[in-house]
Image (cartoon, rainbow, N blue to C red):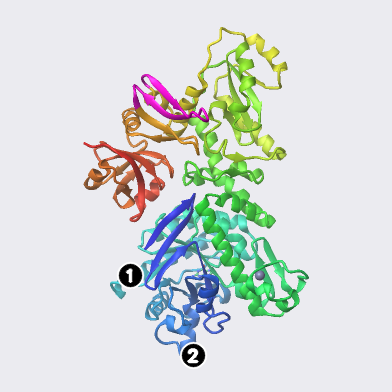
Amino acid sequence: MFEIVDRDGLGRLGRLATRHGSVQTPALLPVINPNNVLIPPREMADRFGAEIVITNAYILRRTKSAGGSVEGDVHNRLAFEGPIMTDSGAFQQHVYGDVDVTNGEIVRYQASIGSDLVTMLDVFSEPSHSRAEASAGVDETLRRAKEAAAIKEEVGPDPFALVGVVQGGVHAPERTRCAQEISKLGVDVAAIGGVVPLMESYRFRDLVQVVIASRQGLSPHLPVHLFGAGHPMLFALACLLGCDLFDSASYAKYARAGRMMFVDGTWRASELEHRICECAACAKRTPAELAGDERAIAEHNLAVSFAEIGRVRQAIKTGDLWELVERRCRAHPALLDGLKELRRHASWLESFEPLSRHSALFYTGSETVYRPILHRLRTRLQERYSPPRRKVLVMFPEGEKPYMARQAAAMEKVERVCNAHFLVKSAFGPVPIELDEMYPISQSLVPDQLDLEVLEASEVFARQFLAGAGYEFGILWEGDATLEELSKWREEPTPIDWILQRVRATADMQFGRGAADALLAGKVDLVRSKNTGRVRNVLVDCRHILSMRAHDGFFSLRAEGGKALHRAFAKPALRVVVDPETAEFNRAGKNVFAKFVLAADANLRPMDEVLVVDPDDALVAVGQCLLGPEEMAAFDRGLAVRVREGLPP
Ligand code: GUN
Ligand code: ZN
């Protein structure tokens, strides 16, 4: 019922199917108060593009028992034919301390009024709860989730979608445990609950920890709802951490208090002397008129919120969600703390990072250097890269790109004096000169003036790299004066073919240490672009094994290259194992669907080049995976590997 259409790291564009139509995600669900409808859902759909709304079943049910008229379908009650999610009353438990309904009653009630997404009655865990309290709450939440799943089974063949809730307070292990167990229960949506108090008090660093700990336990096939996240300044960050659905009562609550929400903060309408927004509600009123109009402020809040959802969707499509998040998190110091928290989770976040993106990486501040893609670059340099055998290392300062072309004259001068290797001390860490065209090195923009913290980090990264690299002497290039220093290391010249070195280093960084030796065993011919001189195709013994992509500097793998890697790397490395029943189709060049993936190498990343094998490890195709390994195994829908070449038996 949930299909991923596109993704950027953990952020994803999806389609959620319900009995009343499908919903594009990320989605914002405006909260409709059934007893006080400020803006009717139909109008929300027509004017703001809301595809789904949420209302509170606990309140609906109380209204009914007090002699009200809530019978029959919630769609009639709200006069909305689209999908409707209902909440259970767990939040009222947080506000009032207790609720007079059981889990079984409220789940059955939601089913009886035809809700499309039914929420169990979870136990709201307060941030102040001790680990023991949170743990007891998780136990009870899980018991109720099982009960709700059983009720769903009873209800019949085409029932509602069930929303299971992840609680656990601010205790990461409880969050992860709750999420893991919820994932096993056959729920259709996972919601992260108990976070409203964190958001109300701007504890965004704790929020990031809670969302990550929850997400770490959830199966990737589940859409993730973040309960109570209604401020647009938060949407980009929450999507970056893998949240797909948000509900907002904030648009109305803020409006009641005369407050206008923007992506970079909140303003009191009465304090605005100038027009600062072009939305329809603001455009036709003076600031003074707006300040006295609760409904107009609510419309403004919705317009800004839905526009931000659109902006996030576009960022996922374009591949610049990180940049958007880095910009948004500068709106408030507490959000900046949330952003800075991400570096502590870089290695987990890295596992969802695509091999490359189509958009350039922008440096927006000192946090950028800790982005997962750059964490990967530094880790792979340690684990996969082997520098050419040279005693001397010459280090260039950060400069214009591509580095090798810019430093060609200096390199030539040095090579006339001694045999050296070269690297650039970039803001992101040391970059061996032959890797300068690999994403995101030449596809990134960095300001000339770097923050002190970044200069220090760059020193640390360089020291870490040099500790294991085996050079005897390293020197910073300071122009011709450096040549004199280098003359002590004068040797018989043994020139390096830097173009071949680029091919070798890229192969090891992309596929793993030893890949270059495996792929390039034989007579190597490099076919280069007539215009740019850049390598296009790699032939070994006249067989085309690799193509180098212009946009990211990585290789596309050909069947002959796949065979070489398959021989050299033992399973499960680089492999996606497919159902033997469908392997024949892949041999014929057909794509691999996630449904037929049995297993995948845990070290694969989205957009990696992969070996498609059958369970006996026979190579059936080579291609590019669109999902991460965990996702390929968990998803029942969508493409897993775009096959480039099949290998007929
Ligand atoms: N609305 C806001 N927070 C929560 C929560 O933790 N659980 C539920 N069910 N609804 C909420
Ligand atoms: Zn406005």
Say if 222 sits above or below 50 in the image.
above
Looking at the rendered structure, which numbered label has been put on residue 150?
A: 1
Q: Secondary structure at mark 1?
A: helix
Say if 147 sits above or below 357 in the image.
below
Q: Secondary structure at mark 2?
A: loop
Label 2 to label 1, Cα distance in Å? 29 Å
Corner quadrant of residue 466: top right
Residue 241 picture location, percent across and down: 52, 54
Depth order, front residue of 422/557:
557
Please indicate whether residue 465 sits to the left or right of residue 85 in the image.
right
Amino acid identity at mark 1: Ala
Say if 395 sits above or below 557 in the image.
above
> Which residue occupies the extreme bottom position in the image?
67
- Examine the rendering and report whether any part of residue 253 can be seen: no
* Residue at image mark 2: 66
Residue shown at the point (68%, 22%) measured from the top left: 477
Residue 134 picture location, percent across and down: 51, 62
Residue shown at the point (52%, 51%) measured from the top left: 318
Please indicate whether residue 329 sits to the left or right of residue 22 in the image.
right
Residue 398 picture location, percent across and down: 66, 31
Depth order, front residue of 78/62:
78
Q: Is residue 124 magenta?
A: no
Q: Is residue 525 magenta?
A: yes
Corner quadrant of residue 206: bottom right
Say if 192 sits above or below 492 in the image.
below
> Which residue occupies the extreme front position in the image?
530
- Examine the rendering and report whether any part of residue 14 can be seen: yes
Q: Which residues are magenta?
A: 521-543
Amino acid identity at mark 2: Ala
